[in-house]
Amino acid sequence: MTNRKYLEFNAATGFPAGSCIRYECGICGETLASMPEHAAACKCRNIIVDADAGRVAVKDSSKMKAYETD
Ligand SMILES: [Zn+2]
């Protein structure tokens, strides 16, 4: 069982990212890496991470959480 330490962030200025940081979708409940090898998206595609372009696209950022694992 890993601990989830939720991070505060402002979606208007950017999303936290790092090798220990993951995103959690509040709609479909899926989690994904903030720095995937190429690209990742949750099942409902609320969160799309395009690592190649260095972009995170979120449709509804109020339904998204970011957390750090240890
Ligand atoms: Zn989702």
Image (spheres, grey):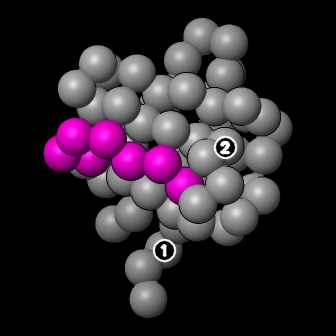
Quadrant showing the C terminus = bottom left
Question: Left or right of 16: which side holds 28?
Answer: right
Q: Relative to residue 8, is residue 70 depicted above or below?
A: below
> What's the residue at 68%, 12% (across, down)?
12
Q: Relative to residue 30, is residue 42 depicted above or below?
A: above
Quadrant showing the N terminus = bottom left
Tell me the SS state at disc 1: loop
Amino acid type shown at disc 1 = Asn
Question: Left or right of 64: which side holds 15?
Answer: left
- Rendering quarter of residue 30: bottom right
Range drawn in magenta:
36-42
Q: Is residue 18 visible?
A: no
Residue where numbered disc 2 is placed: 46
Residue where numbered disc 1 is placed: 3
Q: Is residue 8 visible?
A: yes
Q: Is label 2's Cβ within 8 Å of ligand 1?
A: yes
Q: Relative to residue 45, is residue 15 depicted above or below?
A: above
Residue 44 lies, in percent from the top left, at 66, 55
> What's the residue at 42%, 79% (across, down)?
2
